[in-house]
Amino acid sequence: MTTHQPPQQRRYFALLPAAGVGARMAANGPKQYLTVGGKPMLRHAVDAFRASPLVAHTYVVVSPDDGVIDSVLPADLEGVTVLRCGGATRMDSVLNGLRELAGAVAGHDLIMVHDAARPGLTPALIGKLIDGVGDDPAGGLLALPVVDTMKRSAPGADGISVSAATVPRNGLWSAQTPQMFSYALLLRALGSAPDANAITDDASAIEMLGYAPRLIEGHPRNLKVTLPADIRIAEMYLASNEDEGRLI
Ligand SMILES: Nc1ccn([C@@H]2O[C@H](COP(=O)(O)OP(=O)(O)OP(=O)(O)O)[C@@H](O)[C@H]2O)c(=O)n1
Ligand SMILES: C[C@](O)(CO)[C@H](O)COP(=O)(O)O
């Protein structure tokens, strides 16, 4: 007699690595706490996940000695938990956060890892990723097809960089976040990654296991705020509510 197991109910969780120092921003503190669009940068992505009916809970990974987070995410903020387990690299922070979730999430639950430095995320983009990945065991990520011509640099005379080659851009995508994978697969991939410094995004660790995550078209508003000039761009998008379905 066959026993029909009910389909495993997948839940969706957000995990935001927010333990960086923002060296390239060169601000007087970690960039995730800079005021962007009227509130601390980190709060925009947290609020996008909290506004999504698809997301069960949001976890934010900060440095153990973070002295700001309590003023940005009050302890009674519904649907959010702060994990003080940030590490030396982004990958370490994500892996430490995943290990803290053992027992709180099931192996088949989906984890959306999202940079706290991407304030332009919206519930619509979260839903687009979830719909686009479906039940593909390889997971997926938001990304944008590259539109500029890509150059491979080489050191030139007097220390300037020169173009050594043009990298064919067809098939090249610029990875965004969230990057979404089952808890079990992501924990295994990051836990077996050879070198935390070689892993700049979660999907690369998944690819090392032989999986091909789906590329779901994101939006320019979902840029990573890395350099000072990025703040104005982010604020322009945060001030508008254009339809993310169209890349305008
Ligand atoms: N040890 C680290 C490094 C980065 N991050 C987080 O990973 C995301 C993407 O990293 P990035 O944009 O590089 O942020 P920083 O590392 O702070 O920036 P920089 O490289 O300029 O120092 C950010 O939300 C950052 O807070 C993290 O949680 N732990
Ligand atoms: C994860 C990421 O945002 C995908 O593009 C990117 O790799 C993060 O790089 P960073 O140097 O940690 O900002």
Image (cartoon, helix red, strand yellow):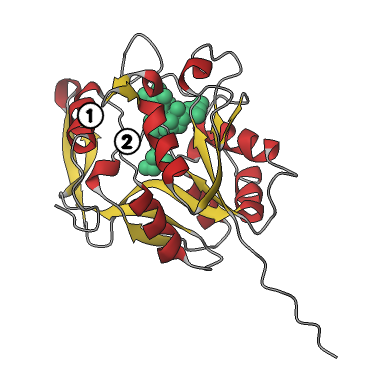
From the top left corner, tell me how far across and down residue 35 is, in percent.
31, 19
Circle 1 residues within 10 Å: few <14, some 14–19, many ≥20:
few
Name the amino acid type tagged 1. Asp
Q: Is residue 100 left or right of residue 72?
A: right
From the top left corner, tell me how far across and down residue 200 is, in percent.
45, 39
Label 2 lies in ligand 2 vicinity (Cβ under 8 Å):
yes
Q: Secondary structure at mark 2?
A: loop
Circle 2 residues within 10 Å: few <14, some 14–19, many ≥20:
some
Question: Where 45 falls versus 69 (above or below)?
Answer: below
Label 2, on which residue? 224
Would you say the residues marked 2 and 1 are in contact, meaning their CB atoms lie under 8 Å apart? yes
Q: Earlier in the sequence, mark 2 or mark 1?
A: 2
Cα separation between marks 2 and 1: 8 Å
Q: Is residue 24 left or right of residue 17?
A: left
Question: Observer-nearest residue: 128 or 208?
Answer: 128
Label 1, on which residue? 230
Question: Where 187 falls versus 117 (above or below)?
Answer: below
